[in-house]
Image (cartoon, grey):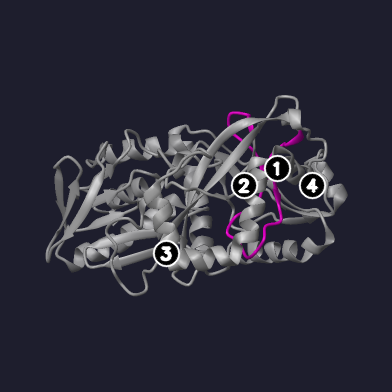
Amino acid sequence: MVVVGAGLIGLATAWRLLRRRPGLAVTVLEKEPRVAAHQSGHNSGVVHSGVYYPPGSLKARLCRAGQAELAEFAERHGIAFERCGKVIVATRPAELGRLAELARRGEANGVRGLALLDRAGLAEIEPACTGVAALHVPGTAIVDFPAVARALAAEVVALGGQVLVGRSVARLVEGSRATVVEVAGGEAFSARLVVTCAGLQSDRFGRPGAAADDLRIVPFRGDYYLLTEEARPWCRGLIYPVPDPALPFLGVHLTRRVDGAVWAGPNATLAWAREGYRRASWEWAEVAGLLADRGFRRFARRWWRTGLAEQWRDLVKGAFLAELRRFVPALERRHLAPGPSGVRAQAIRGDGSMVDDFAIVTRSHLLAVRNAPSPGATASLAIGAHLAGLAAAVLDGSGGR
């Protein structure tokens, strides 16, 4: 078996299958010189509990399972993991209905310890935070995800697999009994099964070609500020706004990290390059491809006002600060220092709608993860187990070991 992509999901899939099938020849190929080079290493480090996702969805089921497995994995490997808890804050009465719906979803998904708070209850947990009400999610945690990825890679190697970095996959050539994975530079690997976990590049090769698979990845850059040491105590855990239910983004929030830093953000602006971590990043082929894509044009017509608002907050520090001051009014411009950026891979259908759930497409000797945004990192071990189960079924059906 060959896994394309050494992010959290690709590594977890290889690890799960090697534990399930000792002795299976498994190779993980990664184009970058290290594992977790993109989404797995550029996220906020939050381990979600499962309050946001529709009951019965893959996100809901795998998030809850993945959180528990991630906590055990981190403890076993000595990786920093802290249940710091989160408050989701309603800053105006119009948000109370959505807050109650989040509580209902969380309870339906088996999230424990949820509590609806009034102003006084919120002040007890986050004294610097203001709002008309809040939902307390005590089980939400933070972790060092790059360390998790490195530990998974070491586990894969210890079980007899290979993790090969600096191998950029050029194309997949499917045959009747095997698929040849051609790597830039002339190297090639033959496998009974290929699993693609390519994140931002997931729609650029190995497309199964089924009519239902009309998904295109649209990259969204998220920029963070860092709170200065003076302002860090104003965020004891995680402080989130009530999200817009029509969008898969959670809004600008405050995140305490395992190293003690506090990140403010991210926004969600269109990135003009698949791995465009800077505002000036530009990839002509990506821009041309987006503008030519019917699904993206439909998406843009629907959401252009939201996009402009996000772009304004990205360019104007005062606008970004105004979002944060809705729930932490003591923050001032001097409390925000430039921080890191990440790029999120968001799948969009041909009709312009965003894919909200995880999306996995199967065909013959190929399993392709098409959409795995947040809580993809949280759920990575559970997604890996799910993919390993699908892979085992394919191998059994094709005579694999």
Nearest the eye: 167 or 278: 278
Residue 258 in the magenta stretch? The answer is yes
Magenta stretch: dominant secondary structure:
loop
Which residue corresponds to the image point at 51% horizontal and 68% vertical from the top-left? 298
N-terminal label among 1 and 3: 3
Counting from the top left corner in percent of width and height, residue 347 is at 45, 60
Q: How far apart are labels 4 and 1 at the CA level?
A: 11 Å
Residue range corresponding to the magenta coloring: 234-262
Q: How far apart are labels 1 and 3 at the CA level?
A: 31 Å
Counting from the top left corner in percent of width and height, residue 224 is at 61, 38
* Vertical placement of residue 57 versus 18, above or below: below
* Vertical placement of residue 76 versus 293, above or below: above
Residue picked out by circle 2? 267
Residue picked out by circle 4? 326
Q: Secondary structure at mark 2?
A: loop
Of tags 4 and 3, which is closer to the observer? Answer: 3
Of tags 2 and 4, which is closer to the observer? Answer: 2
Tell me whether circle 1 and circle 2 mark residues in contact (CB < 8 Å). yes
**Rendering quarter of residue 243:** bottom right
Residue picked out by circle 1? 320
**How many callouts does the rendering have?**
4
